[in-house]
Image (tube, grey):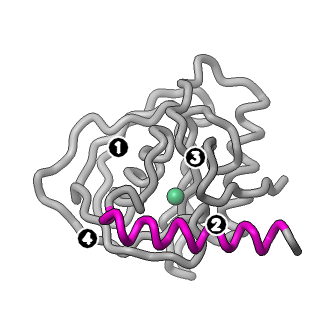
């Protein structure tokens, strides 16, 4: 089932999310709903607070080529345990900040640990777009958005645009 995506500014997008202590069918259903919502948007990553659930859960799939197999990843309690000194710049966007994009610099390579959909501990090294995406999604769990990396003027400009968008949506 698709879930509505919260649009910035929203207090739920600024919260530090709670760890998931035990997997439940409800949480697995939430993860499946988040994947469906992400693919439908379409996007390459989604964090639970973006659908109003302040739990440490993200989903992502950065496979972009048409011919390539999709690779949906569900991560409970994801954690970056090591990151490279080498950095990468990507033009980032966010489903909670529609149609706004900006360059963000992040570590190029990160080691990530998480609990998968079946409750198993996983660890993997991510590079390139995957590394950027997983860091962007984990930031959401700490109440941080990609616009928080920008200067105040740019951030406020984007926030005002989103406030206007929300007013228009509320009227529609
Ligand atoms: Zn985002």
Crowd class of label 3 (few under 14; some 14 to 19; many from 20; radius 10 Å): many
CB at disc 2 and ligand 1 closer than 8 Å: no
The residue indicated by pointer 1 is 124
**Going from the N terminus, do you reach mark 2 or mark 1 first?**
1
Q: x%, y% of residue 108?
A: 22, 59
Label 4 vs 3, first from the N-terminus: 3
> Going from the N terminus, do you reach mark 2 or mark 3 first?
3
Circle 4 residue: 89
Which residues make up the magenta segment?
Answer: 150-170
* Mark 2 surroundings: few (<14), some (14-19) or many (≥20) residues within 10 A: some
Q: Is residue 167 magenta?
A: yes
Label 2, secondary structure: give it: helix
Find out whether the residues at labels 1 and 3 contact each other: C-beta distance under 8 Å: no
Q: 10 Å neighbourhood of mark 4: few (<14), some, or many (≥20)?
A: some
Q: Is mark 3 within 8 Å of ligand 1?
A: no
Label 1 – label 4 distance at C-alpha: 21 Å
């Amino acid at each position: 089932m698709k879930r509505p995506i919260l649009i910035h500014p929203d207090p739920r997008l600024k919260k530090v999310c709670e760890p998931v202590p035990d997997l439940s069918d409800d949480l697995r259903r939430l993860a499946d709903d988040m994947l469906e919502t992400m693919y439908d948007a379409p996007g390459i990553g989604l964090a639970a607070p973006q659908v109003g659930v302040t739990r440490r859960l993200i989903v992502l799939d950065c496979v972009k080529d048409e011919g390539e197999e999709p690779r949906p990843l569900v991560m409970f309690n994801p954690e970056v345990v090591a990151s490279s000194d080498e950095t990468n710049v990507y033009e980032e966007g966010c489903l909670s900040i529609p149609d706004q994009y900006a360059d963000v610099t992040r570590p190029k390579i990160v080691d990530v640990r998480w609990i998968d959909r079946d409750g198993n501990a996983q660890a993997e090294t991510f590079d390139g777009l995957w590394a950027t995406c997983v860091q962007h999604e984990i930031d959401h769990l700490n109440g941080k958005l990609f616009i928080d990396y920008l200067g105040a003027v740019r951030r406020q400009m984007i926030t005002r645009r989103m406030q206007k968008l929300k007013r228009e949506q509320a009227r529609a």
